[in-house]
Amino acid sequence: MTDPTSSLAAQLVELQRIDTLVDQLRVQRERTPLRATLAEETQKLGSWERRQSSVENRVAALEAEIEDDEKRGAEIATHLERLNRQLKTVIAPREAEALMHEITTLTEQRDELDIRELEAMEEESTLESELATNLAEEPALRAGVAVATDALAVGVADIDRQLETLKDERVDAVTGLPADVITRYDRARPQLGIVVSRLEGKQCTGCHLDLSAAEIDSARMDAAETGFTDCPQCGRILVLRTD
């Protein structure tokens, strides 16, 4: 015939086993390497997106600069054409000299625009090549994030299924336990983590301290009715027998 007092002690041990597993699974859920893998893949994609955006913005700025230079160059060319026609009709030396000076100044400005436009076009060409190279990398980067996301979801879902199973097991484990014992256990859990320990030899498995012969005798007397008592060293629920 099963000793009901020992059964209560066994329930406490089972309750602690379940809660310890729950704690471990929750830590595993948050610290799984799959999260680091996803973060790494996401970071690589983010770096790629930032670089791609930066290059695209620079290309757009260069295109606007080239367009402005071409417009300004066309205006200068028109102005030079008018000045050269005017120069052919000028007789006064001083007026001709002024026109020549203006023509020289505008020609220098046009040359500077041509050089700047050429440099902008060369940079644009280089950046467009980079954009093409980057675009070729995009599918692999996005696939990496997708694979890591799916792997994390599968891993977390598996842990969540285990947690649900343990949740049901915990209901069975607490059924029949005295309310005051459950209350004490639940209150001690946040501080101690491991609330239920065993006496192995002379040592409490919770605090790993040895009990004196007198403390062991006293514990055995206290546990005679319930199968458990308090550890005199750490205050945990100390189970002496479960069968």
Image (tube, grey):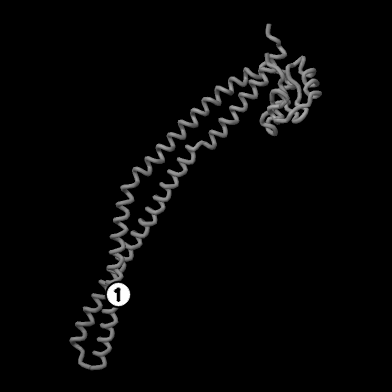
In this rendering, the count of numbered labels is 1
**Left or right: 43 in relation to 170:** left
In this view, the residue in front, 196 or 218, is 218
Which residue is label 1 attached to? Answer: 112
Circle 1 Cα neighbour tier, 10 Å, few/some/many (<14 / 14–19 / ≥20) = some
Position in image of residue 200 (x %, y %) = 69, 23
Write the residue at 49% across / 28% down. 158
Q: Quadrant of residue 22?
A: top right
Can you say whether 101 is above or below 129 in the image?
below
Position in image of residue 210 (x %, y %) = 74, 28
Can you say whether 217 is above or below 62 in the image?
above
In this view, the residue in front, 233 or 103, is 233
Amino acid bearing label 1: Glu
Q: Residue furthest bottom?
A: 93
Write the residue at 18% across / 87% down. 89
Position in image of residue 38 (x %, y %) = 45, 40
**Left or right: 138 in relation to 162:** left
Q: Residue furthest left?
A: 88
Disc 1 on helix, strand or loop?
A: helix
Q: Quadrant of residue 184?
A: top right
Can you say whether 138 is above or below 193 in the image?
below
Q: Quadrant of the C terminus?
A: top right
Q: Quadrant of the N terminus?
A: top right
Can you say whether 38 is above or below 199 in the image?
below
Position in image of residue 222 (x %, y %) = 79, 19
Q: Quadrant of residue 169?
A: top right
**Left or right: 7 in relation to 141:** right
Write the residue at 49% across / 39% down. 35
